[in-house]
C-alpha cells in the first residue's frame, strides 16, 4: 500500500500548530506551520467589518469562541450582530442567554449583513494552502481542540471537568479512550470538528499535549517506571496529568491567567501527593482536580510544555521539545495516538 499523508492540527486559542506528516519521510523534513488560531482569524474579520460599518451574520458551526471581544466592540460601535443558532453555540450553550447580549438568532439573515464563517477546520483553506505550497493533499486528518462540552444552564468549568472525571471513572484513564472517531454527544465542538475534517480522528488538546510529552522516548520510559507528571501551560488553560503504565492516574486543570509560579508549584506538589482537593482548584477559578484512589506515590519527574511554560522558569522542572519542536507537542501526541492506539 502506498504511504499515506496526514494533516495534523493542534488548534488552540492563540495559534494552530500544524504538521503535515508523510509516512517514510524523516520527521525533521515533514512540513510544519505555526498559524493564527481560527478564532483569531474570525476576530480579524469582525474588526474589518466594524471599520467598514457593516452588520454581521455569524454562520457555520460551533468553534472556539475567542473572538468575543471583537464581537462586543462591534456592538459597541452601534452595529448589529445576527447569528445562525448552530454558529451561536460558539459563544455558549444557552441560546437564550446569548440572545440576551443583543445577538439576533435567525436562520434567515438580512442580506444587508456580511457573513462571518465560523469553523475550526476550513477544508477549502487547507486545500488551497497546501496546493499553493506545492504540498500533497492529506489522506486523512488528525485534529484537537479544547471542548467544554454542552451543558446549558451549568458552569462550563464544572462541565469541562466532568469530562475528565468520566474519563477517569468510566475509562480508567486508558489512553485509547482519549481519541475519537465518534466523539461523545455532549462534546459538541469535537463533533463539529470531526464532521469538518472528514476522515480522521479528533481529541482534546489536553490529551494531545500529554501524549506529545510521551513522544519523547525518555519521558515514555519514565512513565513506564515510577511515573511522570506532565504539565502543559497553554495561553488560556494549564492542565497536568499523572501518567504511569500507559494510564492517566490524575488530572488537574486551571486557568493560566489565575496562577503564578508559586501557586502552580504548590498545586502540583499537592496534586502529585493526592491531597489537592477538587474544590480548592474550582474555588480558585479553575476547573478541578481528580486523582485515582489507587494512584500511589511516585511521579517525581515533572516535564513542562506549552506556550506559557516560561512561568516555571527556574523551578525544578524539565522543559520538553518532543520531536524537536515544543509548539508541535500536540501534533506529535496525535501522531503517537494514531500510530499506537488507533488505526483508521
Image: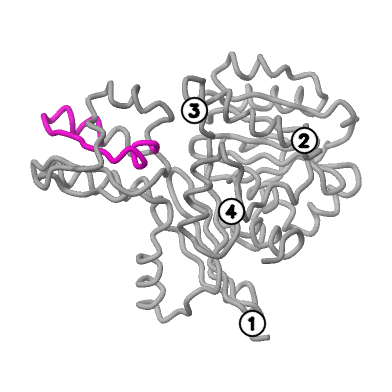
Residue at the (27%, 43%) spot, across then down: 58
What's the distance in space between the residues labelled 1 and 3, CA to CA? Answer: 43 Å
- Residue contact between numbered discs 4 and 3, judged by CB atoms under 8 Å: no
Q: Is residue 81 magenta?
A: yes
Q: Pointer 4: what residue?
A: 202
Kindly report which numbered mark, 4 or 2, lies closer to the viewer in this rendering.
2
What's the distance in space between the residues labelled 4 and 1, CA to CA? Answer: 21 Å
- Residue contact between numbered discs 2 and 3, judged by CB atoms under 8 Å: no
- Residue contact between numbered discs 4 and 1, judged by CB atoms under 8 Å: no
Circle on res. 257: 3
Kindly report which numbered mark, 1 or 3, lies closer to the viewer in this rendering.
1
Circle on res. 315: none
Label 3: which secondary element: helix
Q: Pointer 1: what residue?
A: 3
Question: Residue 110 falls in which quadrant of the image?
Answer: top left
Question: Residue 75 falls in which quadrant of the image?
Answer: top left
Residue 237 falls left or right of residue 70: right
Amino acid at each position: 500500500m502506498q504511504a499515506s499523508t496526514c494533516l495534523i492540527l493542534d488548534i488552540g486559542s492563540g495559534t494552530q500548530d500544524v504538521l503535515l506528516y508523510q509516512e517514510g519521510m524523516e520527521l525533521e523534513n515533514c512540513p510544519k506551520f505555526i498559524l493564527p488560531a481560527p478564532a483569531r482569524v474570525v476576530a480579524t474579520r469582525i474588526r474589518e467589518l466594524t471599520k467598514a460599518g457593516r452588520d454581521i451574520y455569524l454562520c457555520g458551526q460551533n468553534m472556539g469562541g475567542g473572538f468575543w471581544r471583537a464581537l462586543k466592540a462591534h456592538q459597541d460601535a452601534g452595529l448589529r450582530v445576527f447569528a445562525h443558532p448552530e454558529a451561536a453555540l460558539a459563544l455558549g450553550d444557552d441560546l437564550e442567554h446569548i440572545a440576551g447580549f443583543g445577538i439576533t438568532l435567525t436562520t434567515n439573515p438580512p442580506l444587508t449583513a456580511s457573513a462571518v464563517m465560523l469553523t475550526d477546520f476550513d477544508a477549502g483553506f487547507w486545500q488551497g494552502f497546501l496546493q499553493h505550497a506545492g504540498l500533497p493533499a492529506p489522506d486523512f486528518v488528525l485534529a484537537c481542540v479544547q471542548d467544554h462540552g454542552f451543558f446549558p444552564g451549568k458552569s462550563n468549568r464544572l462541565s469541562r471537568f466532568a469530562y475528565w472525571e468520566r474519563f477517569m471513572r468510566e475509562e480508567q484513564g486508558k489512553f485509547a479512550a482519549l481519541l475519537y472517531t465518534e466523539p461523545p454527544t455532549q462534546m459538541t465542538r469535537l463533533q463539529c470538528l470531526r464532521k469538518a475534517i472528514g476522515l480522521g480522528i479528533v481529541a482534546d488538546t489536553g490529551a494531545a499535549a500529554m501524549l506529545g510529552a510521551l513522544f519523547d522516548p525518555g519521558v515514555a520510559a519514565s512513565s513506564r517506571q515510577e511515573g511522570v507528571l506532565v504539565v502543559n501551560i497553554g495561553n488560556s488553560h494549564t492542565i497536568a496529568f499523572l501518567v504511569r503504565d500507559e494510564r492517566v492516574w490524575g488530572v488537574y486543570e486551571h486557568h493560566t491567567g489565575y496562577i503564578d509560579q508559586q501557586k502552580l508549584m504548590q498545586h502540583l506538589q499537592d496534586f502529585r501527593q493526592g491531597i489537592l482537593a477538587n474544590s480548592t482548584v474550582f474555588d480558585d477559578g479553575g476547573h478541578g482536580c481528580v486523582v485515582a484512589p489507587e494512584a500511589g506515590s511516585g511521579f517525581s519527574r515533572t516535564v513542562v510544555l506549552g506556550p506559557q511554560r516560561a512561568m516555571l522558569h527556574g523551578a525544578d522542572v524539565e522543559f520538553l521539545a518532543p520531536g524537536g519542536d515544543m509548539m508541535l507537542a500536540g501534533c506529535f501526541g496525535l501522531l503517537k495516538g494514531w500510530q499506537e492506539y488507533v488505526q483508521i
